[in-house]
Image (cartoon, rainbow, N blue to C red):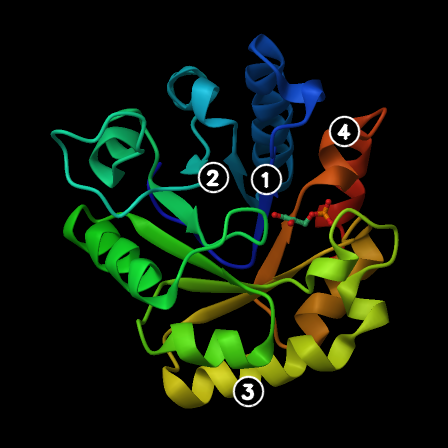
Amino acid sequence: MSELKTPVVVVNFKAYAEVDGIKAVELAKVCEEVAKETGVSIAVCPPVAELGAVARAVSIPVLSQNIDPRKPGSATGWMTPSMVNAAGAVGSLINHSEHRFQDEDIEQCVSMCRELSMVPLVCAESVDKAKRVAAFSPDFIAVEPPELIGGDISVTSANPRIVSDTVDTVKSVDPKVKVLCGAGVKTGEDVRKAIELGAEGVLLASGVVKSKDPKKTLMDLVSGL
Ligand code: G3P
């Protein structure tokens, strides 16, 4: 499946030890199970080392956690959009808070995704940054205040304004760009609030990856849609 339908729950596995090796495939299968049982659009971003294995194992959309603005060829150690696409990624996060890029590199990554019909999902730490990257017309922008990432308070409670302001600002630049929000999102109530604030889904990590019962957590999360 190559489409990223909205509303969407994007689960970023990050580089947590909980998803090392085969455990990334196992968690992706849980996400697939919940997507199939509930009909909710769920996408996963496994660690790069497991991208191909995950993409072969599940039918839900798989995104890369990163791409580099490099063409195939002499680019040792870089992640070309082409190689992640060939491994099964239908899109990629770009400029995650833990892997930031300059604006010109973001623009190039978005345009390289376009050439490969991949879905670019650009992260932004502020309304201003979201406004700047909206000019590149990615499919998605996810607003995530860095100070709330990995914490227990959802952006939707701690800073609801950043979500609604990002939606308004991004839509005023390019109404086609869809806005997600993330940081501390862990419950169905957080997701419900995100939608109420105008977001078309959420980007989250620790709530699911570090959960003792990821299926239960995911079922609760999607109940907010
Ligand atoms: O990519 C999602 C992320 O940065 C938010 O992380 O753990 O706060 O859900 P978390």
Residue 104 visible in rendering: yes
Give the mark nearer the N terminus: 4 vs 3. Answer: 3
The CA span between labels 4 and 3 is: 33 Å
Three-letter code, disc 1? Asn
Three-letter code, disc 4? Pro
Label 3: which secondary element: helix
Estimate how packed mark 3 is, as few (under 14), some (14 to 19) or many (20 or more) residues with alpha carbons within 10 Å: some
Residue 54 visible in rendering: no
- Report the disc number at residue 214: 4
Q: Outermost residue toward the top?
A: 22
- Report the disc number at residue 168: 3
Residue 223 % position (x, y): 76, 50
Quarter of the figure with the C terminus: bottom right
Left or right: 119, with 51 as reference point: left
Residue 153 % position (x, y): 87, 58
Give the mark nearer the N terminus: 1 vs 2. Answer: 1
Q: Dividing the picture into quarters, in which one does residue 197 lie?
A: bottom right
Q: Which residue is mark 1?
A: 12
Left or right: 208, with 102 as reference point: right
Q: Considering only vertical position in the picture, is 149 above or below 37?
A: below
- Do tag 1 and tag 4 residues touch (Cβ < 8 Å)? no
The CA span between labels 4 and 2 is: 20 Å
- Report the disc number at residue 65: 2
- Do tag 4 and tag 3 residues touch (Cβ < 8 Å)? no
Which residue is drawn at the image coordinates 75% and 47% (left, top)? 221
Three-letter code, disc 2? Gln
Q: Dividing the picture into quarters, in which one does residue 207 lie?
A: top right
The CA span between labels 1 and 4 is: 13 Å
Which residue is drawn at the image coordinates 60% and 74% (left, top)? 126
Estimate how packed mark 4 is, as few (under 14), some (14 to 19) or many (20 or more) residues with alpha carbons within 10 Å: some
